[in-house]
Image (cartoon, rainbow, N blue to C red):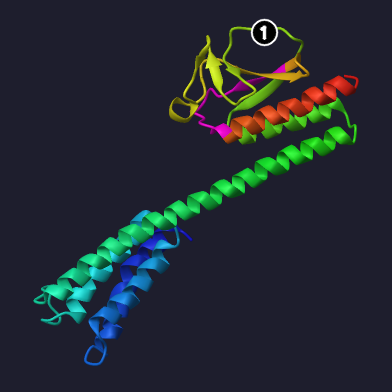
Amino acid sequence: MNRNRVLAIGLVVPPAVCALLALLRDSFDNANAALVLAVVIVGVAAFGHRSAGVLAAVSSAVWFDFFLTVPYNRFTIDSRDDIETTILLVVIGVAVSEIAIWGRRQQARASRHRGYLDGVITTSQAVATGGSTQDLIDHVRAELTVVLGIDGVKFVAGNNRTSAPQLNPDGTVTRGGHILKVERDGLPTNAEIELPVQHAGRIRGRFLLTAATHIARPDLDQRRVAVALADQVAAALTTQPH
């Protein structure tokens, strides 16, 4: 859902719920009212927007104070228990928002990894069916661009090695013998990165990866998928004519 819409829900729903609960406050314990508001906060936080979850928590606490604590219809609280409950509503909102965001990120990561796996499987199937090597290379170039989040990829045949940065079989990226911290600093933007295409220890070519217009920070799993894709091309070049 649109972030602004979720923010509006987080702002408007708590006072509406508190106003309804106020009609029952003579027969409805404040602890139960707080539980109802906690459900509202969880519902808003589940959308995965940190600011919306926090806003819902603050709004719930403010209107809980106004409608449901003595003195009523004033932004003051006389009861220590009600003060603690109000604080807990804010704490719950922040905590639940963080948990919801973490869950969304984990879900997105799992979805991405399924997509990467599907790409490797599709490439393996293309190799198995014995299609055109050039079509396979073009397919892998497109997959590498998506998996690594880079600008583009080109393939160069041959076994010449250069001093350019290297994406190694273990997923590390090195430059001049030094391992680069890709997750922190990103892939080099001032040079192409070589991804060797090798099979049985023999280099059949290399993919040249370009990440010049923005900082790309593919994680280790993404880089290992890139290596696996390149290995599929190497296997095809070994068994099929160019």
Foreground pick, 181 / 194: 181
Residue ranking furthest to the bottom = 27
Q: Is residue 133 shown left or right of residue 94?
A: right
Query: Which stretch did the figure color magenta?
Result: 206-220
Label 1, residues with CA under 10 Å away: few <14, some 14-19, many ≥20: few
Seen at 44% across and 62% down, the residue is 46
Q: Is residue 131 shown left or right of residue 123?
A: right
Callout count: 1
Q: Is residue 39 shown left or right of residue 23?
A: right
Q: Is residue 217 magenta?
A: yes
Q: Is residue 88 visible?
A: yes
- Splitting the image into 4 quarters, where does residue 28 fall? bottom left
Q: Main secondary structure of the magenta part?
A: loop
> Given the image, on which type of amino acid does mark 1 rest?
Arg
Seen at 82% across and 30% down, the residue is 135
Foreground pick, 51 / 85: 85
Q: Position of residue 177 (x, y in %)?
A: 53, 11
Q: Is residue 119 shown left or right of residue 31?
A: right
Q: Is residue 58 visible?
A: no
**Residue 241, above or below 27:** above
Q: Position of residue 222 (x, y in %)?
A: 60, 34
**Residue 79, above or below 119:** below
Determine the secondary structure under disc 1: loop
- Splitting the image into 4 quarters, where does residue 154 fall? top right
- Splitting the image into 4 quarters, where does residue 10 fall? bottom left
Q: Is residue 199 magenta?
A: no
Q: Position of residue 99 (x, y in %)?
A: 41, 56
Seen at 38% across and 72% down, the residue is 39
Seen at 76% across and 32% down, the residue is 139
Residue ranking furthest to the left = 78
Q: Which residue is mark 1?
A: 161
